[in-house]
Image (cartoon, rainbow, N blue to C red):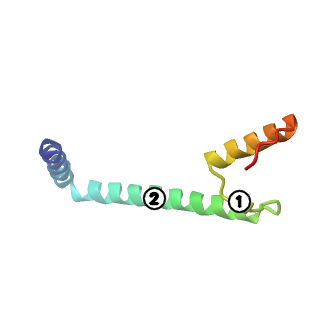
Amino acid sequence: MKKIRDKIERQILHADRKWKELPAKRQRFFTKLFFAGYTVVNLLVLISIFITTANDNNTMSISHITTISDHTAMKRQSHDNKTGSTIKK
């Protein structure tokens, strides 16, 4: 675990050193570019949310939580009912 942490730390220091070596004008350009990308992604997510919530046929189904054991019990009941079994439960 310590080797992984050291490797990550070296990568971060290397990236930080490369960033500081860039001219200030280039740093500003990359910062604006990253911010513009972040803004576009946020706008796309918001538009997607508005479109999906604006649909009239958008309904939410609320039902009981079923588990695997519930499904097997229901299958067993339906099988017992079909065969006319007299097993007590």
Name the mark nearer the viewer: 2 or 1.
1
Please tell me which residue lies in front, 26 or 64. 64
* Residue 8 position in % (x across, y down): 19, 46
Which residue is situated farthest in the top direction here? 83
Q: Where is residue 69 in the image (x, y as percent from the top left)?
A: 62, 46
Q: Quadrant location of residue 78? A: top right
Relative to 56, say whether 75 is above or below. Answer: above
Q: Under tag 2, what secondary structure?
A: helix
Q: What residue is at 17 percent from the left and 55 percent from the top?
A: 20
Q: Name the kind of residue labelled 1 in the image.
A: Thr
Q: In this view, does 22 lie above or below 56?
A: above
Tag 2 residue: 38
- Looking at the picture, how far across and down is residue 7, in whole percent? 15, 43
Instruction: Report the side of 47 relative to 55 (left or right).
Output: left
Q: Dot 1: what SS?
A: helix
Q: Which residue is drawn at 72% across and 63% down?
A: 62
The N terminus lies in which quarter of the figure? top left
- The residues bearing labels 2 and 1 have C-alpha atoms spaced at a distance of 21 Å
- Who's the residue at 16% across and 48% down the image? 5
Vertical placement of residue 9 versus 80, above or below:
below
Amino acid tagged 2: Tyr
Closer to the chain start, of discs 2 and 1, is 2
Where does label 1 land, which residue?
52
Percent of width and height locating residue 49? 64, 62
